[in-house]
Image (spheres, rainbow, N blue to C red):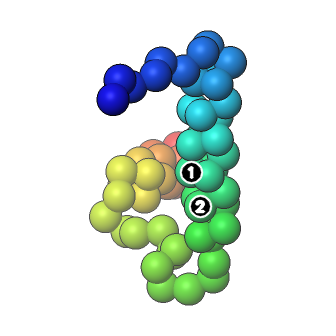
C-alpha cells in the first residue's frame, strides 16, 4: 500500500499540533518544588554569581 503524501495545509497543521502539545507539556510542568528549583550548577547561576561579585567590587 502506498503512503499518501500530506498536502501543505495538513503538514502545517501536523507540525503546529506537535508544537502545541510540546508547549503545553512545558508550561504545565512548572511547579513549586525541588524538581523545578533552579540548579546551582547551571550556567545562569554561575553567570549571576560572577555578576554579583563584579557589582560588589564596583
Picture layout, residue 25 above or below residue 4: below
Rounded to the nearest angstrom, the CA distance separating label 2 from label 1 is 5 Å
Residue 30 percent coordinates (x, y)? 62, 70
Residue closer to the observer: 13 or 32:
13
Examine the image and state in which quarter residue 46 appears: bottom left
- Checking the image for residue 22, the label placed there is 1
Is any atom of residue 53 visible in this view? no
Residue furthest out toward the bottom:
33
Picture layout, residue 11 above or below residue 19: above
What's the residue at 59%, 34% (across, down)? Answer: 14
- Checking the image for residue 25, the label placed there is 2
Question: Local crowd at mark 2 within 10 Å, few (<14), some, or many (≥20)?
Answer: few
What's the residue at 48%, 68% (across, down)? Answer: 38
Residue closer to the observer: 56 or 36:
36
Residue closer to the observer: 16 or 2:
2
Picture layout, residue 41 above or below residue 50: below
Question: Local crowd at mark 1 within 10 Å, few (<14), some, or many (≥20)?
Answer: few
Is any atom of residue 8 visible in this view? yes
Q: Quadrant of the N terminus?
A: top left
What's the residue at 43%, 58% (across, down)? Answer: 45
Residue 2 percent coordinates (x, y)? 35, 23
Residue 11 percent coordinates (x, y)? 58, 24
- Of helix, strand and loop, which one carries label 2? helix
Residue 43 percent coordinates (x, y)? 36, 51
Q: Are marks 2 and 1 in contact (CB under 8 Å)?
A: yes
Amino acid at each position: 500500500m502506498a503512503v499518501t503524501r500530506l498536502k501543505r495545509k495538513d503538514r502545517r497543521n501536523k507540525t503546529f499540533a506537535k508544537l502545541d502539545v510540546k508547549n503545553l507539556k512545558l508550561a504545565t510542568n512548572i511547579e513549586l518544588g525541588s524538581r523545578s528549583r533552579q540548579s546551582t550548577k547551571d550556567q545562569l547561576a554561575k553567570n549571576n554569581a560572577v555578576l554579583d561579585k563584579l557589582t560588589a567590587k564596583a
